[in-house]
């Protein structure tokens, strides 16, 4: 059992190195499996548990994968895929496993998904993925636990997503990239990570247009080839470090090529946090105490990312006044509220809305990370709390943040990652 121990009170200062994006690297590993010849190289890979699971899963289907941790580089040779089974013991541990389906379909004619993991955020349907595969000519057999997708060749079609699903868009692009003819995906996701995946697929030889418009057209090609690609910076990791500076009254220089925090920056600015771009570095500092309250509504890009809703709840708890949060993407993403309240916050949840009455002084406590983002939100709470906070399970935090304790300690935080028995 991994846990994080945080002693609050230190302002974070210095240069924070932002990792590569989890939600870009996972589909890119899936994309690398589409390639029958040569070795794909991914740079700026975050060394997180989800990447380790993706490596294990790629190996389970027959790929040869080298994860060079110090170099943050993955080298993937998918020339000998030999199993269409995504085994439950690995697939149930992360959501990104669903991104392997298109490659298995194209390379082996079937994908057998024995389970799908990921954060427990309420209902997380995959119907857009399966309806899309069916429209492209696949047969989908959805058993109670195992999903079997089969196709002896896919053909382009017009696809529509009821809501712009992030992994749904990536999967249907990958399925369409090697299908015969033209596919149009309407109401496609606009997230920067999706665009980064499109960039990589385009370098691989895919013919994709309309990325970022909501209407994506894919002209199928015969084969894709191996490329080298650098994963974009993780805007969620960057958002967390910006918030850490905000709540501790610190000052951080965020380093990560092309970082753009979008609406998260504007919301933090409204709360009293200062941002300044200095060339390639984004500087964030907060002298204002206490912060001003805020209203946020989560949405697909360019709206406020649901993955930063939990960390923002911690920031709101430390703001002077009442903040309102409306969660519109997931129907079960407020598990953090009860844990923050154990630390002295005053958060009231009513369906998809939360009211956060601040500023309440936070006190260290033993708390539970219910998912990745509630875990990192509790780390933030610990940094601002008086006394010691113990957060379990740290594994969930490690799913998405690389070397968190080391990176935060380098900035002055008192945080340790511990492995306990049981
Ligand atoms: C690995 C990865 O990239 N994970 C991200 C991805 O998850 P993921 O791709 O799973 O999220 P989606 O965008 O697909 O889901 C958003 C919403 O759409 C619904 N839906 C989705 C697909 C579907 O077939 N049917 C359906 O109803 C879901 O139940 C959910 O309510 O986007 C989420 C929303 O930005 C982020 O929180 C996750 O970090
Ligand atoms: C919901 C998340 O991840 P996943 O989709 O991988 O469960 C997340 O990163 O907050």
Image (cartoon, rainbow, N blue to C red):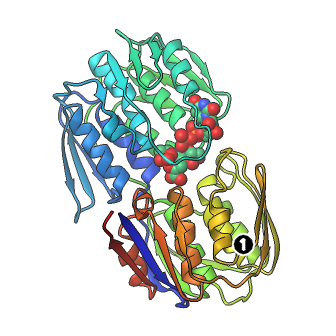
Residue 116 lies left or right of residue 152; in this view the side is: right
Residue 4 lies left or right of residue 73; in this view the side is: right
- Image location of residue 268, percent across then percent down: 69, 72
**Ligand 1 quadrant assignment:** top right
Quarter of the figure that contains the N terminus:
bottom left
> Which residue is at the far front?
422
> Which residue is at the far right?
322
Along the line of sight, the residue nearer the viewer: 167 or 145: 145
Along the line of sight, the residue nearer the viewer: 331 or 213: 331
**Residue visible at 37% across and 51% down in the picture:** 50
The residue tagged 1 is: 316
Along the line of sight, the residue nearer the viewer: 11 or 15: 11
Quarter of the figure that contains the C terminus:
bottom left
Q: Is residue 264 visible?
A: no
Q: Secondary structure at mark 1?
A: helix
Q: Is residue 68 visible?
A: yes
Indicate whether 351 appears above or below 319.
Answer: above
Residue 41 lies left or right of residue 297; in this view the side is: left
Q: Quadrant of residue 286?
A: bottom right
- Image location of residue 305, percent across then percent down: 63, 54
Q: Quadrant of residue 200?
A: top left
Number of marks drawn: 1
- Image location of residue 189, percent across then percent down: 60, 38
- Image location of residue 135, percent across then percent down: 53, 13
Q: Residues within 10 Å of mark 1 (few under 14, many from 20)?
A: many
């Amino acid at each position: 059992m991994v846990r994080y121990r945080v002693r609050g009170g230190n302002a974070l200062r210095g240069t924070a190195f932002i990792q590569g994006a989890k939600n870009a690297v996972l589909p890119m590993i899936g994309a690398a499996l589409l390639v029958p010849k040569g070795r794909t190289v991914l740079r700026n890979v975050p060394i997180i548990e989800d990447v380790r699971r993706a490596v294990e899963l790629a190996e389970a289907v027959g790929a040869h994968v080298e994860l060079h941790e110090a170099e943050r580089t993955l080298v993937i040779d998918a020339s000998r895929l030999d199993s269409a089974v995504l085994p439950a013991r690995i697939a149930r541990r992360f959501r990104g496993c669903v991104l392997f389906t298109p490659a298995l379909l194209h390379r082996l004619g079937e994908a057998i998904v024995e389970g799908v993991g990921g954060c427990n955020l309420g209902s997380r349907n995959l119907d857009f993925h399966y309806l899309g595969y069916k429209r492209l000519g696949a047969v989908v057999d959805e058993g109670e636990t195992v999903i079997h997708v089969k196709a002896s060749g896919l053909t382009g079609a017009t696809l529509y997503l009821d809501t712009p699903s992030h992994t749904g868009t990536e999967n249907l692009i990958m399925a369409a990239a090697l299908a015969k003819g033209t596919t149009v995906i309407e109401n496609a996701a606009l997230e920067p990570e999706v665009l980064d995946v499109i960039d990589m697929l385009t370098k691989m030889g895919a013919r994709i247009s309309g990325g970022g418009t909501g209407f994506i057209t894919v002209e199928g090609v015969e084969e894709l080839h191996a490329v080298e690609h650098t994963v974009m910076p993780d805007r969620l990791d960057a958002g967390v470090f910006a918030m850490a500076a905000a709540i501790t009254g610190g000052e951080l220089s965020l380093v990560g090529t092309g970082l753009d925090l979008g609406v998260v920056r504007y919301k933090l600015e409204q709360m009293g946090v200062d941002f300044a771009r200095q060339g390639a570095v984004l500087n964030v500092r907060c002298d204002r105490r206490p912060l001003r309250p805020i209203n946020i509504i989560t949405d697909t890009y360019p709206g406020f990312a649901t993955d930063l809703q939990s960390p923002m709840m911690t920031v709101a708890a430390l703001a002077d006044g009442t903040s309102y949060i409306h969660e519109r993407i997931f129907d079960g993403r407020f598990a953090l509220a009860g844990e923050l309240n154990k630390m002295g916050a005053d958060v009231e949840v009513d369906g998809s809305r939360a009211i956060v009455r601040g500023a309440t002084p936070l006190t260290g406590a033993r708390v539970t990370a219910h998912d990745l983002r509630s875990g990192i939100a509790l780390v933030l709470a610990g940094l601002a709390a008086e006394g010691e906070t113990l957060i379990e399970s740290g594994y969930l935090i490690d799913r998405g943040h690389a070397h968190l304790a080391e990176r935060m300690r380098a900035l002055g935080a008192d945080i340790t990652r511990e492995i306990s028995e049981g």
